[in-house]
Amino acid sequence: MGRWQSGARERLVMAALDLYVERGFDETTVAEIAARAGVTERTFFRYFADKREVLFEGSALLEQLVVQTIADAPVDASAFDAAIAGVRATREFLVDRDFSRRRAAAIDANASLRERELLKLASLRDGVAAALRARGADELTAAVAADAAGSVFHHGFQRWIRGDSEDYSAALEQALAAVRGIR
């Protein structure tokens, strides 16, 4: 094994995901992930704090993208429209449906991973609300807009990975139409 092999992070992610789907999260060790990726355990820990983080490494980047998009929204955009602009920005981040499906399956099969996913989604909603408050929205408006945008994101993503919509953008717009149509 070379010390500085290119693509080690990506190989570790794919190896971990393969093993989680094949054997289960709890039954998979870091040593097995590293071996399948062709690196050492030490290399694994250079990239990830623990084996859960392999599935959640992109969460912070996704949140940064959403929050920055909200900050960059036109000043006359409503809190809801700014939050939706942030959700729409996830289109550039979530492009591999097969990976997303496999990741979701691994998370759904493990209670602690489901809990971690919920915490990451809550962090995203908190980030959206904070970005909206920074734009001048009051506490209640920011919270409700963040929750509504989070719902659009969640349901759009679920429609996309289930195959209800072939296109992620279309799935988001379908979920947005559903929110706008609530009476």
Image (spheres, rainbow, N blue to C red):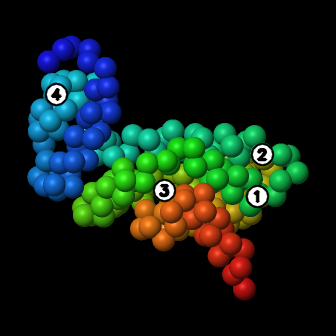
Q: Amino acid at mark 1?
A: Asp
Residue, disc 2:
73
Query: Which label sits in the foreground, 4 or 3?
Result: 4
Query: Where residue 163 appears, x then y in whole percent?
Result: 44, 67
Label 1–label 4 contact, CB within 8 A: no
- In the depicted structure, whether residue 175 falls above or below residue 130: below
Q: Amino acid at mark 3?
A: Leu
Residue, disc 4:
38
CA distance for labels 2 and 1: 8 Å
Q: Residue at x 58, y 40 (%)?
A: 64
CA distance for labels 2 and 4: 44 Å
Going by the picture, which residue comes out furthest to the right?
76
Is label 1 in a helix, a strand or a loop?
helix
Residue, disc 1:
81
Q: Amino acid at mark 4?
A: Gly
Is label 2 in a helix, a strand or a loop?
loop
Q: Nearer the viewer, residue 83 or 106?
A: 106
Residue 150 visible in the picture:
no
Label 4–label 3 contact, CB within 8 A: no
- In the depicted structure, whether residue 42 falls above or below residue 105: above
Looking at marks 3 and 2 on the same chain, the residue that comes earlier in the sequence is marked by 2
Looking at marks 2 and 1 on the same chain, the residue that comes earlier in the sequence is marked by 2
CA distance for labels 1 and 3: 19 Å
Label 2–label 1 contact, CB within 8 A: yes
Q: Amino acid at mark 2?
A: Ala
Query: Where residue 116 appears, x then y in whole percent?
Result: 36, 55
